[in-house]
Image (tube, grey):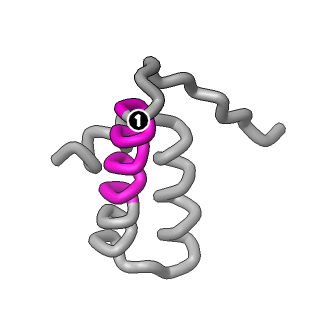
Amino acid sequence: MCAMTTLKYDPQLKEYYNKKKAEGKNSMLVLNNIRCKLISRVFAVINRETSYINTYKFAS
């Protein structure tokens, strides 16, 4: 459920999802990849002991 909610509120992961779907990937495969990305973000924040900083730049 977190991965699906992330698609609504995180533009970076939404763009990643749309790109992979356009490549013909299965939606559950892409959602599983997003889950892994979320877990990586959480552990990075815990290890650094800082808040999450979004440094993503949109392509113009």
Q: Is residue 1 above or below residue 34?
A: above
Bounds of the magenta segment = 34-46
Q: Which residue is mark 1?
A: 47
Residue plotted at (39% across, 67% down): 30
Circle 1: residue type: Asn
State the image coordinates of residue 56 (x, y, percent, origin top left): 66, 34
From the viewer's perspective, tell me whether residue 51 is left or right of residue 35.
Answer: right
Q: Is residue 34 above or below residue 32?
A: above
Residue plotted at (32% across, 49% down): 39
Residue 60: say if magenta. Answer: no
From the viewer's perspective, tell me whether residue 57 is left or right of residue 37.
Answer: right
Q: Is residue 23 above or below residue 37?
A: below
From the viewer's perspective, tell me whether residue 30 is left or right of residue 13.
Answer: left
Secondary structure of the residue carrying numbered label 1: helix
Q: Quarter of the image holding residue 36?
A: bottom left
State the image coordinates of residue 41 (x, y, percent, origin top left): 42, 41
Residue plotted at (56% across, 49% down): 15
Residue 37: say if magenta. Answer: yes
Q: Quick one: 36 or 12, which is closer to the camera?
A: 36
- Spot the residue most to the right: 60
Label 1 neighbourhood size at 10 Å, few (<14), some (14-19), many (20+)? few
Q: Quick one: 18 or 55, which is closer to the camera?
A: 55
State the image coordinates of residue 8 (x, y, percent, origin top left): 36, 36
- Looking at the rendered image, the quarter that the C terminus falls into is top right
